[in-house]
Amino acid sequence: MALPSRVYLNGEFMPAESARISVFDRGFVFGDGVYEVVPVYGGRPFRLAHHLRRLEASLTAIRIANPMAHGKWEEVFHELIREHGAIDQSIYLQVTRGVAPRDHAFPAHVVPTVFAYAQPLTYPTPDQLRTGVTAITVPDMRWLRCDIKAIVLLANVLLREQAIENGSAEAILVRDDCLTEGAASNIFIASGGILATPPKGPFILPGITRDLVIELANHNNVPCIEREIRRAELLAADEVWMTSSTKEILPIVRIDGQAVGDGRPGPLHTHLQTLYQDYKHAFRRGEVE
Ligand code: PDD
């Protein structure tokens, strides 16, 4: 994918090649910052209030005051969306603590760095949706605050790369024999017609797509439980899916070389995928928020 040509940086929209950030920015030096990825459908940011609430929670957790009111964030997104032009796209935003001499302790006076851009949205291919993808399970070696959408993604990067090198699309992370989430996704299983996904807490990112899948299941009488899921249950499930703003609901049909169910995307995936796409279309028409 090509680099975006326009960005927003600290109050200004500019060509990406003109954007300058200090090498002393704590985002660069410490990974001291948080981010969001917001899909845009029909020119409108999808589940915007949810993303801004999660941004607020991440900022609060790392004790950075939100540098902009929600209305101002919306203005920035609309300008980026307008400049980018595509009907569907995605917004990346990140806030770091700002520029200061290198010292682990918080600097006394510092102004957060605010950076955002729009880029093309890459959906799973029709082939991936039809045949599903494969995954591996790996120990979750990340820290104990995975609920914060922190820019420090070194563990996630290494884990995803391990999956790729294994010929898989995702690494499913396991902590104390229970699955937490994917390297960059949340995980659902379906067993006996019942959906399950690990509960929110410090070990997973509270995914916006995850919440929408649960909401759609609840509204359409598909039983869905948030509970601990053991690795053995994952491997014995009828269906397994990964969810994220960019992957939407992607079926996983093989884990650690073993087929999930009959090795093909299952009927509950088809059902929820249809509900999800219908919801997106309704959003594009302005019928739902
Ligand atoms: N990542 N868990 C992790 C660790 C993630 O990085 C992501 C998404 C999710 C799913 O969250 P959501 O449904 O809100 O996208 C769960 C984004 C897409 C990324 O880092 O690019």
Image: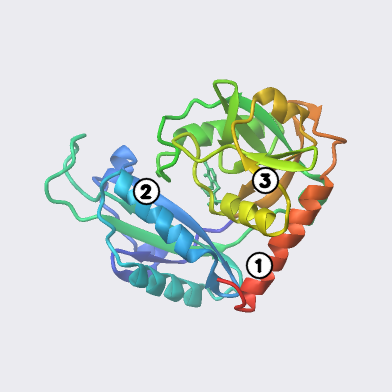
Q: Could you tell me which residue is drawn at 16 percent across and 41 percent down? A: 101
Q: Secondary structure at mark 3?
A: strand
Q: Position of residue 143 (x, y in %)?
A: 42, 29
The residue wearing badge 3 is: 224
2 and 3 marks in contact (CB < 8 Å) = no
In this view of the protein, which residue sits in the foreground, 161 or 2? 161
3D distance between C-alphas at marks 2 and 3: 26 Å
What amino acid type is highlighted by mark number 2?
Ser
Tell how many labels: 3
Tell me the quarter of the image containing the N terminus. Answer: bottom right
Q: In the rendered structure, which disc, 2 or 1, sits on the residue that comes first in sequence?
A: 2
In front: mark 1 or mark 3? 3
Q: For the view shown, which residue lies furthest in the right direction?
A: 262
Q: Is residue 127 visible?
A: no
**Looking at the picture, how far across and down is residue 285, in whole percent?**
64, 78
Q: Are marks 1 and 3 in contact (CB under 8 Å)?
A: no
Q: Disc 2 marks which residue?
A: 58
Any mark on residue 280, and which? 1
Tell me residue 147's x, y (percent). Answer: 44, 41
Amino acid found under the numbered disc labelled 1: Lys
Of the numbered discs 1 and 3, the one sitting upstream in the chain is 3
- Amino acid type, callout 3: Cys
Label 2's element?
Answer: helix
Do callouts 2 and 1 mark residues in contact (Cβ within 8 Å)? no
Q: In this view of the protein, which residue sits in the foreground, 189 or 94? A: 189
